[in-house]
Image (cartoon, grey):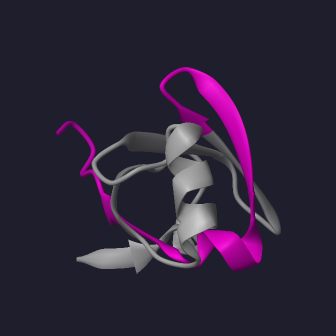
Amino acid sequence: MLIPLDMLKKGEVAHIAEVSGEVAWVNRLAEMGLREGCQLQVLQPGSTCLLNVAGCRLCVRSHESSQILVRVQEPGA
């Protein structure tokens, strides 16, 4: 089941399934490592969401995180 990134809770791990929006924005996210298939962990949810992506911390604004659809990784998977 796919859900928007902004619905994840602190500590949840997910894989990006789809990023929508303007091409330039989607490409910029991909340059930062936020692309289809990548794994991320929510460090701090909220209006500015703090993520761990490949050992790097990234912030994404809430209106942008709603355009990133993820598949939550089940604990222990």
Q: Nearer the viewer, residue 11 or 36?
A: 36
Residue 58 in picture, x, y percent from top left: 70, 40
Q: Quadrant of the C terminus?
A: top left
With 15 as the anchor, is 42 left or right in this view?
A: right
Q: Quadrant of residue 17?
A: bottom left
Q: Nearer the viewer, residue 57 or 34?
A: 34
Residue at the far top in the pictured view: 55
Residue at the far front in the pictured view: 24
Residue at x 46% of width, y 42% of height: 40
Q: Nearer the viewer, residue 18 or 47?
A: 18
With 33 as the anchor, is 28 left or right in this view?
A: right
Residue at x 49% of width, y 47% of height: 30
Please say whether residue 61 is one of the residues in the magenta stretch: yes
**56 to 31, vertically: above or below:** above
Residue at the far right in the pictured view: 47
With 29 as the anchor, is 4 left or right in this view?
A: left
Q: Quadrant of residue 3?
A: bottom left
Residue 25 in picture, x, y percent from top left: 63, 64
**47 to 31, vertically: above or below:** below
Residue 29 in picture, x, y percent from top left: 58, 51
Residue at the far left in the pictured view: 77
Please say whether residue 56 is one of the residues in the magenta stretch: yes
**63 to 44, vertically: above or below:** below
Q: Which range is magenta?
A: 52-77
**30 to 17, vertically: above or below:** above
